[in-house]
Amino acid sequence: QVQLVESGGGLVQAGGSLRLSCAASGSIFSIRAMGWYRQAPGKQRDLVAAITSGGSTNYADSVKGRFTISRDNAKNTVYLQMNSLKPEDTAVYYCKADYARRWGESVNSWGQGTQVTVSS
């Protein structure tokens, strides 16, 4: 079992910045990709940004140019730098890891979520 521990959420004014971190620990053979999703009240959980072990990234259109995802493979940690935050970015942000505990396996785990609130 792999545990994902998120940190860095909080309350910020519109236009401000926050940096989220997510550290994976446990029985890890390899991590193929890590990403951030968010879920606002009454809405579905959507992809915000993802990054592969090779460094390829993917962003939701709504955050392109404002958010940057990065990864420290040695620490099994993924970061989300969020700049120019808007009230519509308010949500619970979840970290997800796609990984293997042994050769040929493909599983995923979710973090517990961290609240990001942007005031207008």
Image (cartoon, helix red, strand yellow):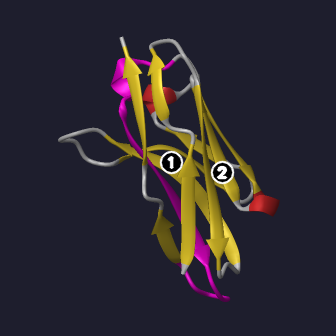
Which residue lies most toward the left here?
Answer: 42
Label 2 neighbour load within 10 Å: few <14, some 14-19, many 20+: many
Mark 1 in CB contact with mark 2 (< 8 angstroms): yes
Name the kind of residue labelled 2 in the image.
Val
Question: Which quadrant of the structure image shows residue 115?
Answer: top left
Rendered location of residue 106, percent (x, y): 54, 79
Which residue occupies 60% across, 73% down? 99
Bounds of the magenta segment? 85-106
Q: Is residue 104 magenta?
A: yes
100 shown above or below 42: below
Name the kind of residue labelled 1 in the image.
Trp
Seen in the image, is 89 located left or right of residue 28?
Answer: left
Which residue is under mark 2? Answer: 78
Q: Quadrant of the C terminus?
A: top left
Mark nearer the N terminus (1 vs 2)? 1
Rendered location of residue 12, percent (x, y): 47, 21
84 shown above or below 19: above
Of helix, strand and loop, which one carries label 2?
strand
Q: How many marks?
A: 2
* Nearer to me, 38 or 63: 38
Q: Quadrant of the N terminus?
A: bottom right
Q: Is residue 103 magenta?
A: yes
- Residue 36's disc number: 1
